Image (cartoon, coloured by chain):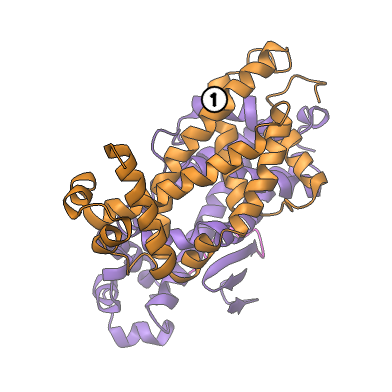
Amino acid sequence: MTVRRGSPYRLDVVAVRGDITHVVALDDRETELLAPDSVERRAVDAVLTCLARHGLTKTTLEDVAREAGCGRATLYRYFESKQDLVEVALWSEVDRFSRTLRAAVREVANLEDAIVTTILVSARELTSHAGLRYVLDFEPEVILPHLAFEAADLLLGAAASILAPGLAPYLPADRADRAAEWVARVLLAYLFRPDSSSLTDESDVRALVHELVLPGVAPSSLLSATRG
Amino acid sequence: MSGPDTAREHVLAATYACVTRSGLARTTVEDAVRESGVSRATVYRLFPGGKGQLLREAVGWEMNRFFGRLADHVAGAAGLPAVLEQGLVFAHRAVREHRVLQQVLATEPGRLLPLLTVEQHRVQRLVAAYLRPVLDREAEQGRLRPGLDRRAAADYLSRMALSLMGAPGRWDLEDPQQVRRVVREELLGGILAPGVR
């Protein structure tokens, strides 16, 4: 069990057996999690490049060092292991994603658009992530244990805490968390599946949200609420 | 025993029995041949993809049996809300109490989950196909939102119900009040006509 609280990365992240259970951004900072040009930043970029090229199993710290243009000894000063580096890369990507999402939902003015935007941005980021695609397509045994059954419970909780702030202006606090989990479920249930909407087409997503998702998460009395 | 379908069923049942005893990695085609009593030639002809195909179809076979039990359980349910409520309660408990599933998940999740994921796409379509006539009957009684796309609704309900069965998240599916709430609000909020219970 790994718990990092008040970490230098300023994300309160609790990881149990390598699964992220809860992610809370400690501030509304616009800047990146890792300082640009830092060794950590270059190492994270390098491991993401390697993942997209060769996947997780075949990527070694030598590959990462070569890609990052630094020595292996340097890497080991910052990361205990490949596993450690991959976890930091994951948190860095989660952080980048939540900042992207936050910027996008800032532009909307009602709950329906907030949900549509949340789904479109999430789907776009996830389906275009080359490292994630490689692992899902060619190393499912590595990632699926983190996406199913009890691990999915943890993932949904973490995803809900990332999505909830975007919905919070339009719903009472408890309903925002509940709605965020439901939207995370929709993403998990539709993304990366054959004969399913990829959730990247705006008109498909608008129809799904308007007809089926929104009426489920907001009783009609809340539907006309706009940003307060 | 006669006919290829019966032989197929027999081999899959035998494979499942082998997996129950020895797990996925250690179950071989030869084990299935021995356990089933079907000729080696027939087994290799029925499953040209070898061990990979055999294991995937054995997982699919057991999933079909699981969803068959689920369908039997909700057969008496009156109306869409009851089908979903009773289905979720039963399925959630059945997943948790499925000894072989829980055993293989604990010991060989990396081997099982790719197989389960592939088979789950097929099962999702079966669940949607099951729900479609239930939706149609509700429509005949004027209980659905006018203009509802029933194909999209069946697709949505099957995906979201399967999601809840495997990973209930914040929902305590042993609490009838919470089951009722997630069914009537999240699942059916856009499907039932306003005012329909």
Q: Which chain is purple?
A: A
Q: Residue at x 42, y 46 (%)?
A: B61
Residue beneath disc 1 = B152
B175 vs A90, nearest the viewer:
B175
The quadrant in which the N terminus of chain B is found is top left
Q: Amino acid at mark 1?
A: Ala
> What secondary structure is the stretch in magenta mostly built from?
loop
B124 vs A174, nearest the viewer:
B124
Find residue B164 and report its horizontal and vertical position in percent.
Answer: 62, 47
- Image quadrant where residue A104 sits: top right
- Image quadrant where residue A175 sits: top right
A73 vs A191, nearest the viewer:
A191
Specify whether residue A9 is in view: yes
Q: Residue at x 62, y 17 (%)?
A: B136
Q: Which residues are magenta?
A: A25-34
Task: Please state the chain letter of the residue tagged with numbered disc 1 in the rendered image.
Answer: B
Q: Residues within 10 Å of mark 1 (few under 14, many from 20)?
A: some
Q: Which chain is orange?
A: B
Examine the rendered structure and indicate whether residue A162 appears above or below residue A58. above
